[in-house]
Amino acid sequence: GAVVSQHPSRVICKSGTSVKIECRSLDFQATTMFWYRQFPKKSLMLMATSNEGSKATYEQGVEKDKFLINHASLTLSTLTVTSAHPEDSSFYICSARDTGGPRLYEQYFGPGTRLTVT
Amino acid sequence: DQQVKQNSPSLSVQEGRISILNCDYTNSMFDYFLWYKKYPAEGPTFLISISSIKDKNEDGRFTVFLNKSAKHLSLHIVPSQPGDSAVYFCAANFGNEKLTFGTGTRLTIIP
């Protein structure tokens, strides 16, 4: 149980285009999902907290107009990287908190999406 | 302000021996601590957690120890196996909000 999927796993896009990444909780409901970014050999950097039915909460320094987050249902959150630039190339990981689970502090992570902007 | 720190970026351990990964924190309000394991190009997977009201939690080969007075926790893996080679992150939770992650320790198990 507690499986989180991400799609796509890899994407290559041209500079200036937009890319959407989906995060789904497959066997549980998640009112809260999180989006992280990981640079090579670095820790996970929390970008934003996605709340179902309301606006996302962005961490300091993360541009909300560039990284659009939509959490329209209890099992799906999307991250759209708008007007992508090469410096946006990174590994993006989502996680979800099981709303009905016994351990609300625990986050289940997706497999990640490797974004390359050319 | 790094509230969760893993001061050892890497650790090498002989197969069959004990691996000890360390983590320090500064916020005494953290109520749960978690360890995650991560392989390259994959998302982290949950290993084990501990409540701040406990000092030890064991699950198979994995044991987490918490020393609240020292604001220190450690993950023990025994016996270490080649499949344990990965990056290990400790994370801390406060009030079921976002997790705060350490910078990770790369564990290499030497056959």
Image (cartoon, coloured by chain):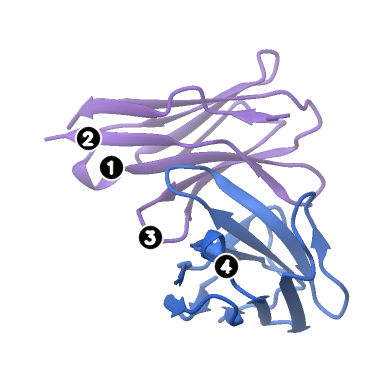
Chain colours: A blue, B purple
The image shows residue A102 at horizontal and vertical percentages of 69, 60
Q: Are marks 4 and 1 in contact (CB under 8 Å)?
A: no
Question: In the figure, residue B56 lies in which quadrant?
Answer: top right
Q: In the image, is residue A46 above or below residue B42? A: above
Q: Residue at x 29, y 43 (%)?
A: B84
Inspect the image, locate mark 2, and give the three-letter code of the amino acid beneath it.
Ile
In the rendered image, the vertical position of residue A105 relative to residue B7, given as above or below: below
How far apart marks 4 and 1 lie (CA) works out to 34 Å
Find disc 3 in the rendering and name its residue.
B41
- For label 4, the SS is loop
Asked whether the residues under the numbered discs 2 and 1 touch, taking CB atoms below 8 Å apart as contact, a structural biologist would say yes
For the residues marked 3 and 1, what is the alpha-carbon distance in whole angstroms?
14 Å
Task: Say yes or no: labels 4 and 2 on the same chain.
Answer: no
Determine which residue is flagged by label 2.
B109
Q: Which one is earlier in the sequence, the residue at label 3 or at label 1?
A: 3
To which residue does mark 4 refer?
A85
Q: Indicate the amino acid at tag 1.
A: Ser
Q: CA distance from mark 2 to mark 1?
A: 5 Å
Name which residue type carries label 3.
Ala
Q: Is residue B84 left or right of residue B55?
A: left
Q: Is residue B89 above or below residue B73?
A: below
Check chain identity for marks 2 and 1: say if they share one.
Answer: yes
Name the residue type under label 4. Answer: His
The residue indicated by pointer 1 is: B85
